[in-house]
Image (cartoon, rainbow, N blue to C red):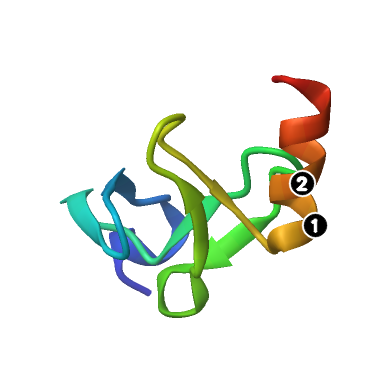
Amino acid sequence: MTPESDTPATLHYGDGEFAVLKPGRFVRCAVTDRPIPLETLRYWSVTRQEPYASPAEFAQRLKSGG
């Protein structure tokens, strides 16, 4: 196992793409803290700079105002 496999990546979330600032294989969902492999990451907020596991978590975050 490489050190990148067990540490989260640090990303900058842009419109339709993200840039890797610190290598890693996953990020943690801002709502559930569940790991999201970078190859399956599809949902994030550019404004809040945070990732979501699915549209449901994004909607939950918007509802909570967090």
Judge by depth and name the residue closer to the eye, 52 or 10. Answer: 52
> Looking at the rendering, in which quadrant would you find the N terminus?
bottom left
Helix, strand or loop at disc 1? Answer: helix
Asked if residue 37 lies left or right of residue 64, the reply is left
**Residue beneath the point at 27% across and 50% down:** 14
Amino acid marked by disc 2: Ala
Asked if residue 1 lies left or right of residue 60, the reply is left
Q: Name the residue under label 2.
A: 59
Rendering coords of residue 25 (x, y %): 38, 66
Residue 49 figure quarter: top left
**Residue beneath the point at 32% across and 64% down:** 16
* Number of the label disc, if any, that sits on residue 31: none
Judge by depth and name the residue closer to the eye, 33 or 12. Answer: 12
> Looking at the rendering, in which quadrant would you find the C terminus?
top right
Rendering coords of residue 9 (x, y %): 34, 51
User: In the rendered picture of this protein, how many numbered marks are placed on residues?
Assistant: 2
Q: 10 Å neighbourhood of mark 2: few (<14), some, or many (≥20)?
A: few
Q: Find the distance from the CA under tag 2 to the CA under tag 1.
A: 5 Å
**Residue beneath the point at 81% across and 41% down:** 60
Pointers 2 and 1 in contact (CB under 8 A)? Answer: yes
Residue 4 figure quarter: bottom left
Rendering coords of residue 48 (x, y %): 46, 29
Q: Name the residue under label 1.
A: 56
Judge by depth and name the residue closer to the eye, 8 or 52. Answer: 52
Rendering coords of residue 55 (x, y %): 71, 61
Helix, strand or loop at disc 2? Answer: helix
Q: In this view, does 55 lie above or below 10?
A: below
